[in-house]
Image: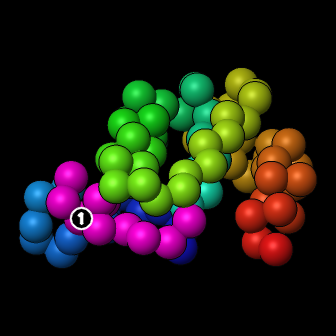
Amino acid sequence: MRANQTFIAGHGDSLGEGLTAIEAPTLMLYSENDLVFAPESVRRTAELIEADGTDVTLETLEGNRGHLDGVVSIDQASDTLRAFLQ
């Protein structure tokens, strides 16, 4: 599943309840310079998903292109992506 700023976990429930209901292992890639998905929000989202023991892998993409680092710097996470999908 790809993140989308219009998606609300829980479909009307609280965001925290929706995120803690996630049971599938989750991979989150983000950039510290992202202005669309603020890094502190990404980390907090990971914490909420992990709260009930769900496995979350959080990896930072390095770069200076903000949100676009998720596209142009994705090769940095190739090993992590490969391992996650296996």
Q: Of the residues shown, which amino acid type is indicated by label 1?
A: Gly
Q: Decide if residue 8 is in sight here.
A: no
Image quarter for residue 59? Answer: top right
| Front in this rendered view, residue 26 or 5 | 26
Above or below, comparing residue 43 to residue 27 in the picture: above
Whether 13 is drawn above or below 42: the answer is: below
Horizontal side of 79 relative to 62 (left or right) equals right
Residue 16 appears at what percent x and percent y? 21, 52
* Residue identified by numbered label 1: 18
- Location of residue 79 with respect to 43 vertically, above or below: below
Span shown in magenta: 16-25
Residue at (87% x, 54% y) in the render: 78
Mark 1 surroundings within 10 Å by alpha-carbon count, few (fewer than 14), some (14 through 19), many (20 or more)? some
Residue 73 screen position, x and y as percent? 81, 43
Q: Which residue: 18% across, 60% down?
A: 17
Total numbered circles: 1
Say whether residue 84 is visible.
yes
Q: Position of residue 76 (x, y in %)?
A: 85, 43
65 left or right, relative to 14: right
- SS at badge 1: helix
Q: Is residue 16 above or below residue 9?
A: above
Residue 48 included in the magenta stretch of the image? no
In depth, the one of 19 and 62 nearer the eye is 19
Colour setup of the view: rainbow
Q: Residue furthest front?
A: 53
Quarter of the picture containing the C terminus is bottom right
